[in-house]
Image (cartoon, rainbow, N blue to C red):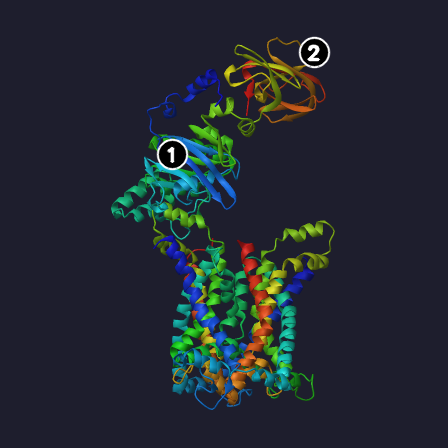
Amino acid sequence: MNPRSRFLDATALTLGFAFLYLPIVILIVYSFNASQLVTVWGGFSTRWYGAVWQNRQLLDAAWITVKVAAVSAAFATIVGTLAALALTRYLRFRGRTLFSGLVYAPIVMPEVITGLSLLLLFVSVGIDRGFWTVTVAHATFTCGFVAVVVQSRLITFDRSLEEAAADLGATPWQVFFRITLPIIAPAVIAGFLLAFTLSLDDLVIASFTTGPGSTTLPMRIYSQVRLGVTPEINAICTLMIAAVTVLVIGASLATKRGLPAT
Amino acid sequence: MSDTPKTTAALGAVRSAFAPWNDPAAKPLVVFDGVTKRYGAETAVNDLSLAVYEREFFALLGPSGCGKSTLMRMLAGFETPTAGRVVLAGEDLAGVPPHLRPTNMMFQSYALFPHMTVEKNIAFGLQMEGVAKAEIHDRVAAALKLVKLEALASRKPHQLSGGQRQRVALARALIKRPKVLLLDEPLGALDRKLREETQFELVALQERLGLTFIIVTHDQDEAMSMATRIAVMDKGRIAQVGTPPVIYEAPATRYVADFIGDINIVEGKVAAIDGRRVTISTALGDMALPEAADSIAIGQEVAVAWRPEKTRIVRADEPVAGGQTMIEGAVHDIGYLGDWTTYVVEVAGQRLRAAVANASRLVERPISWDERVRLCVAPESLLLLTR
Amino acid sequence: MSERQARRTIILVPYLWLAVFFLVPFAIVAKMSLSQVATAIPPYVPVFGLDDGPAGWLAKARELSLDNYGVIASDRLYIDAFLTSIRIAATGTLILLVIGYPMAHAMARAPENWRPLLVMAVILPFWTSFLIRVYAWIGILKPEGLLNELLLGLGLIGAPLQIANTETAVLIGVVYSYLPFMVLPLYASLERMDRTLLEAAADLGCPPWKAFWRITVPLSLPGIVAGCFLCFIPITGEVVIPDLLGGSDTLMIGKTLWTEFFSNRDWPVASAVAVLLLVLLVGPIVLYQRQQARQLEAAR
């Protein structure tokens, strides 16, 4: 590679990553700002973290959000993994085109449409909105992501591994749980984490499908942000970033202990 | 098959100690009975019947797409025949799922479980059977010893070389003491030197354990060097079944003759039958050979074939003894292979090959390009191919 | 469990889930878009009930009308919102491609042991809250924000720039939020490319910049298409970014729907907007889905 294209590459990466990370860094730095004014530096302080800790409403919302994310991600992982299996293993069945459309469409579907349509479904069958409606809604819009992640792993999966297991006496059930699942596990875990963070992150669909008592953290943050920028929100955001970073690093360590993708 | 009785008897002597297929009282272990497999409009295996005996090292040989793998996979249970029966040790296998069949397979890709150590891979089959832990431990240790992998027991497959992986796959398939061990292109992924070594090891192992092996291969050398018998397959059918020497020296059809080794084939017509001596008239002149007369008639279109290494090449002006087929032509090409030299000789628009062993290092006046030469073939080296 | 039962379970579970929670709701939206708003709970008529019987349903079906679509067609506000959405989505996607392609290209050419790290670095911000990332830009872009302070401090501008609450701010937010969705598919297709192709091109006398246009770009086309759809479609229906960064001047259709639903409580009109948005996007969605399926087929 000649020095000029190397320089171009380095420039593209530096500028690109600066663009991606600077706002986040600024946000974190200002969460330690003693001043009430967001853009004026008033010295280092952790007072806003104390304020967050005092804010029961926010903590409740955070807890609900985590619960919704965990349960919906579990559902999405099951549905998404099955969908990925169906799409890679069964190349011919009735309604396959529609099925693959249903799997991929939620990925790009604007959230307002998904949210509104799910809300109308719940209203028309007379289900009270709350924890379970948000959870089901989140599982529905995230399972497509899980399917894509798992599918990309299944496509390179050597089917003769399953045949070998069957040949050695494993029943179809044993083949799935002892061979297939352990081998695609990194992708399934990645899918779960993706679904989990998408759920944590979602504001629009949650706003449509949640009910009183199940207000999620993004909804709380959103209503505060609309009232104006405060350092307290910076502190919450920093905490969330820290939580996600720990989660991601933990997960990548956990999957690294497994095997390299073959 | 149209083997001449004389050659068959002579060739059979090579492995005369073991030939259950010649014994009418022997019961075959594996029987394919009129088996057909279709995928949509495509027929992979076409009304095929075949018997394999206990303790055989049986090779299914053919080019890719000839149906050999499909045949093996039907025995393992991964494919269901469209028609016909697959019988193992007297039991019809229809409806028996792969995990309940007493066959084990060594996969072409080896299919080693990437998330398990060598030891766990080998133990897997016994665990599925519900064998006691202590026994699994002992049998795995024995299997590791058998394939000389004791030192690598706790490695993962991706930490092994190709040859080591191959041995793990072998141990894993052998440990369940299958009635039949199926080997799908077992040496395909190995380099040439290792492949030759492994061929001998496999045969030694099979004889020592007294197991029945069925191997699928597209490599004729592999089949020839290892198998007790070879089934040459062509488009879903069996072209010929026989011991390696029979397949090579007495091919039943043009297809088999052409597929196995190098051969010269000349088309012709039966001109005369004189007792056991048949004369064929061809574009290159008449050729006479000994052949049982009952299978042919005067005027029948046949082919005469012979192997390059059974051809003598001399200069056209050199005197030769009579009583053999002689064809005169010009040297078109010479291929020096070290141990052999192959001459391509052009005769009446057709190219014939002669292979000469390079028995001495220096030849005083070697035959050169464009020289007029004569190819001499003894009558008993000529083959008559009616199909 | 037999092979056949397994097959049935594997297909039916996700199929039913998606049919019930994704497909059926669209039918309900379509029906709702033909209903009339009412001050009741739920806030629309007619309400179909199981106990109405066929005659009752028929009578109520007659109450359905296209009025809501008439309202939308006659009001410039809705049409403008649609046009603005498409304009912002198209411009944003183009900017994303221009920024994302050099990044993905550089990542794909980076030393092999660096690449997983770089991919991780692109994904990481995506794991942090989307809302937070958009929020961070408010502090940067507002008149007394960091960007203006920096530019004023450097003496590059004399008075604060008005970026917040403009379409520019929305575009910045959109590009920032969707960058990983553009970079990752591009990277995936660029990384797969066989490098000896470029060597072959050079060997045949093709200068590097020409090789880039004639070899690299065509081969990364699947990634370009996937990345563009993955950005364009959701941006069109974006709510949060225009709301937080665009102010009241930038009307996008997703936000209009949101307002109709939450502020005006006009469910039928919101549904009609949703139907129109879906009609607008159904083409791109189908193309995206085909592309996905084809790519997976090619990887097989």
Q: CA distance from mark 2 to mark 1?
A: 57 Å
Q: Is residue A82 above or below residue C273?
A: above
What's the residue type where badge 2 is placed?
Asp
Task: Give the chain of mark 2.
Answer: B
Taking the image as shown, residue B283 lies to the left or right of residue A231, namely right
Report x, y in % for residue C71: 59, 86
Q: Which residue is mark 2?
A: B317
The tag on residue B31 is: 1
**Residue A238 in sight in this render:** yes
What's the residue type where badge 1 is placed?
Val
Question: Which corner quadrant of the image does residue A212 belong to?
Answer: bottom left
Residue found at x 50% / y 59%: A152
Taking the image as shown, residue A15 lies to the left or right of residue B155, namely right
> Closest to the observer: B81 or B365?
B81
> Closest to the observer: C122 or A83?
A83
Q: Is residue B125 above or below residue B26?
A: below
From the image, which quarter does the N terminus of chain C lie in? bottom left
Element at label 2: loop
Mark 2 or mark 1, earlier in chain: 1
Report x, y in % for residue B344: 65, 24
Outermost residue on the front side: it is C55
Of circles 2 and 1, the one toward us is: 1
> Closest to the observer: C148 or B34?
B34
Labels 2 and 1 in the same subunit: yes
Task: Give the chain of mark 1.
Answer: B
Question: Which corner quadrant of the image does residue A81 belong to?
Answer: bottom left
